[in-house]
Image (cartoon, rainbow, N blue to C red):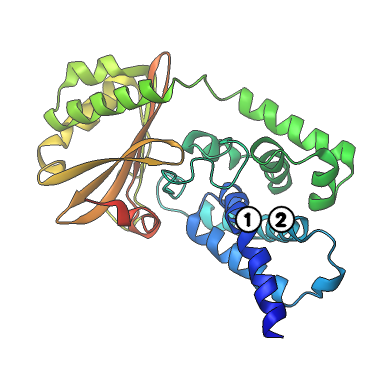
Amino acid sequence: MDENLDDALAVFQSVRRRLFGIAYRMLGSASEAEDIVQEAWLRWQGTDRSVVQDPAAFLATTTTRLAINSLQSARARRETYIGPWLPEPVDTSQDPTLGAERTEALGYAVLVMLERLTPTERAAYVLREAFAYSYAQIHEIVQVSEAAARQLVSRARKHLAGERRREVSTSEQQRLLTAFVSAAQTGDLEQLERLFAEDVVSYSDGGGVVRASKFPVHGRVTVAKFVRAFHTHFWDGVTVTETETNGQPSVLLSKDGTTFAVLTVVASDQGIDQVLWMMNPNKLGGVTSRAA
């Protein structure tokens, strides 16, 4: 029995990162994704593995279906979430694609947009665009016809294409983030306005746990004034550490050795489109070890 369990564990560990990558993209939460992966492991332990022809496919299917079910209940919780909901940051410095073939469906802006898809649309899109699963495989996993699987992915693509702008290169995003942090620290109103797109939005996710704006702040001038308004006390004694979360340049903001926020920007050729302040302490567990 122990030998069989060792074999089962070896198989599971070989695909664990991929399973986490699927679950995280489905849920936008590292902690919930870990719960899904653990449940998949329990299911794998309790399965008659001698009849499973493709363990990796079995585990991907189990994980995706668990994530679909979890997403349905997560949506109800997010309807009562206090303030803007942002994805839980994950450190991607060691694994830039988070177990996938491509980085798709990992960036913050796309994860927020994915919230508007149905759970099955989201699953089909993630499996196809990030993990390069065939439509035949997707139809098996999501339990729809192959034609329906194609339609799910197509609808998801159209929905996202209608909302997203072409993002700038990683180096340009890094430049804009660095410039933003510098201007935010000094309260340089003119520089902030120069960095922003006309319709920039600032989102602060405190989850009602810490003090943060409960509403998105819109517009170049308004966001610039908003950032300047709290610069004198917000940045006092703060250590800024460059890092990479969700495949994009970010900074950890720490005070007295404790990380209290992850900050990043989403940018296009029009400038910074979004400023994202992830401040809910319940969402920072995956990045706190990187604090200086």
Residue occupied by mark 2: 60
State the residue in front, 76 or 288.
288
Q: Estimate the x, y position of residue 286 in percent, counting from the top left.
A: 40, 56
For numbered disc 1, what is the local secondary structure? helix
- Classify 242 as above or below 89: above
| Left or right: 203 as drawn, with respect to 254 | right
On residue 133, the disc is none
Q: Estimate the x, y position of residue 33 in percent, counting from the top left.
A: 55, 58
| Left or right: 91 as drawn, with respect to 237 | right
Q: Estimate the x, y position of residue 48 in percent, counting from the top left.
A: 82, 75
| Left or right: 210 as drawn, with respect to 14 | left
Query: Which residue is located at x 62 percent, y 29 percent?
Result: 160
Q: Estimate the x, y position of residue 133 in percent, counting from the top left.
A: 75, 41
For numbered disc 2, what is the local secondary structure? helix
Query: Which residue is located at x 40 percent, y 47 percent?
Result: 83
- Classify 7 as above or below 170: below
Query: Which residue is located at x 62 percent, y 50 percent?
Result: 22
> Are the two marked residues, 1 and 2, in contact with CB atoms closer than 8 angstroms?
yes
Give the residue type that dot 2 points to: Ala
